[in-house]
Amino acid sequence: MGLDETAQKPHDRLSAHLAADMERVNALIRRRMASEHAPRIPEVTAHLVEAGGKRLRPMLTLAAARLCGYEGDHHIRLAATVEFIHTATLLHDDVVDESAQRRGRPTANLLWDNKSSVLVGDYLFSRSFQLMVETGSLRVLDILSNASATIAEGEVLQLSAAQDLRTDEAIYMKVIRGKTAALFSAATEVGGVIAGAPEEQVGALFTYGDALGIAFQIVDDLLDYGGSTTTIGKNVGDDFRERKLTLPVIKAVAKATPEEREFWKRVIEKGDQREGDLEHAMALLASHGAMEETRAEALGWAQTAKAALAVLPDHALRSMLADLADYVVARVN
Amino acid sequence: MGLDETAQKPHDRLSAHLAADMERVNALIRRRMASEHAPRIPEVTAHLVEAGGKRLRPMLTLAAARLCGYEGDHHIRLAATVEFIHTATLLHDDVVDESAQRRGRPTANLLWDNKSSVLVGDYLFSRSFQLMVETGSLRVLDILSNASATIAEGEVLQLSAAQDLRTDEAIYMKVIRGKTAALFSAATEVGGVIAGAPEEQVGALFTYGDALGIAFQIVDDLLDYGGSTTTIGKNVGDDFRERKLTLPVIKAVAKATPEEREFWKRVIEKGDQREGDLEHAMALLASHGAMEETRAEALGWAQTAKAALAVLPDHALRSMLADLADYVVARVN
């Protein structure tokens, strides 16, 4: 299976199937983002929330709820909740990432943006919190509060794990659960909970979201050492230049010869990167089979996601979710 | 009433009365602040949470709950919740304020601190969220989610209102409700709610916290143009230098002659501040009676706070809360 037209379909099919719900989610997002008192807020968020993002996370919530036969209104609120949380974390990531990328050359403008990013991010978090309280479900609140803690902890962990060659696969998993999988799994799980689905199905929705999120992030990290710029919307080598310990590197470091280890120390720990280093790093990742192993893990997680769907009702949405899992890893397969 | 030994007692008396509860709150804070995965978190928060802050907000929650006869455990969780929210906003304020104070001279170290401040702030928010969910009270969650939104909105509003002479008293009130009063009123209100107090008492606790918070912030803003450095822990003129539109300035701007208006435009809007400008500003505040009027408003809010207590049970804590309202304004009386 390559990156062909067929492989691109699951997301569009989900969009089409959930179009009416998604329109309500978008209307709710616009309404709740507005602030009578602080008109700057929609300005800051407009490019994030309005500009036709993939809306993958809210779609997962809608799909999970509908798949379990939900007919109420709360899935709309929860989908908006999830998108607000996602947008808030993007805003706060801006502060963290921008400062790293422009280290040594910060501008007053950068700092002004930082202020808005921090405060508007907080605003969206608080809005998401209000929305989820409106569902009146303590279980939903429990799931989303735990997801929030996992996300925040993962972000801090990533900060301290960066540039540290001792980062192992267990730490990497915690980081990417926080960074990506925790919100995916909460998105699908709350869809099932709000629908009143049986425990077995709620558990399956959690597992699907968790595995999908992990596969998604591993693929993203893999493409950073091999995808084209157009495919992933960022440049090959960004993680390398930011000295991030992603799965391919962790695997290559674990198998490094003493000489290779010195190379990794220099480029990742010391940050002394020279012409040709990225190419050398990519050659090391290939020679130790680190790219292959990482790819196999991503495929494994996609399989886990698909397998989890077995206990869910036979439904058009179920096959779209299965295809989505395939699609996520198709980029590297 | 001057700033004498007697006037300093209410806070200490509350501390003594609530010592056993407060010890449990402190233990809970330490426990929940810890992160197995990210040991950096307690490092960042230690100086904020551990270093013997006044703990005013959690004390308000404990006092409100005990005053209404509460005998359970949830007031401990809620007090810790309130302190976590407060600490998280302090961390995020650091990012916003530091960048303003050092505008034009940001350092790499400042940016690194910004990262930790943003992410650890988010972590504390998410921890506070988990704690409040544990109380199982949707009403408490509703109050605290609304307070969070008011806080975030007020912060953004403050950012856009700064350096803008059109800022009026209505905007100022929204800013200080967000900055200070919203968490005070939520702190007292949830204490009443968790105790199952009658509606009238819950409403009174809200009003008390709201008015106390407003009085507290007005006094703070007033002292910035007149208190000594030791009294308020910051320097006279900080708000002036940061070009903030606080109540005394808003009142003086409203009564400014055309010539005075040019002065305010120069120092606040354009930020062109010269030797002697702070002294001139203080003279204008005095000549228009802006300091006196502001002081009278603070005293009025303290009276409102005290009056609200009338419907609450006759209890040692009630008189301590009344004395606390007097104490807050004693600094400028």
Image: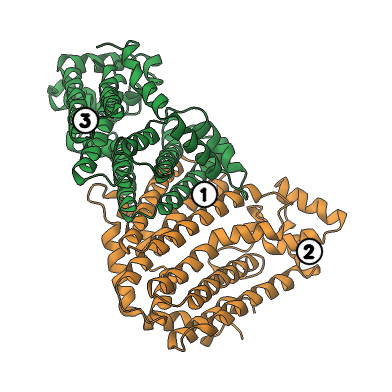
Chain colours: A green, B orange
* Location of residue A159 (image quadrant): top left
Q: Is residue A245 visible?
A: no
Q: Is residue A32 left or right of residue B64?
A: right
Q: Earlier in the sequence, mark 1 or mark 2?
A: 1
Three-letter residue code for mark 3: Ala
Gap between marks 1 and 2, in whole Å?
29 Å
Is there CB contact under 8 Å for labels 1 and 2?
no
Quadrant where the N terminus of chain B lies? bottom right
Q: Secondary structure at mark 3?
A: helix
Q: Is residue A139 visible?
A: yes
* Chain of the residue on which disc 2 is drawn: B
Decide: is B57 above or below B86: below
Residue B98: mark in rendering: 1
Q: Secondary structure at mark 2?
A: helix
Taking depth in this image into account, of A234 and A102 the one nearest to the observer is A234
Three-letter residue code for mark 1: Glu
Three-letter residue code for mark 2: Leu
Residue A17 rendering spot, x and y as whole percentages? 39, 27
Gap between marks 3 and 1, in whole Å?
45 Å
Residue B210 rendering spot, x and y as whole percentages? 55, 69
* Location of residue A191 (image quadrant): top left
Q: Are marks 2 and 3 on the same chain?
A: no
Taking depth in this image into account, of A223 and A195 the one nearest to the observer is A195
Q: Are marks 3 and 1 on the same chain?
A: no
* Location of residue B179 (image quadrant): bottom right
Taking depth in this image into account, of B254 and A126 the one nearest to the observer is A126
Residue A305: mark in rendering: 3
Gap between marks 2 and 3, in whole Å?
69 Å
Q: Which residue is drawn at the image coordinates 41% and 20% (left, top)?
A: A233
Q: Nearer the viewer, mark 3 or mark 1?
A: 3
Taking depth in this image into account, of B64 and B172 the one nearest to the observer is B64
Query: What residue is pinned by disc 2?
Result: B284
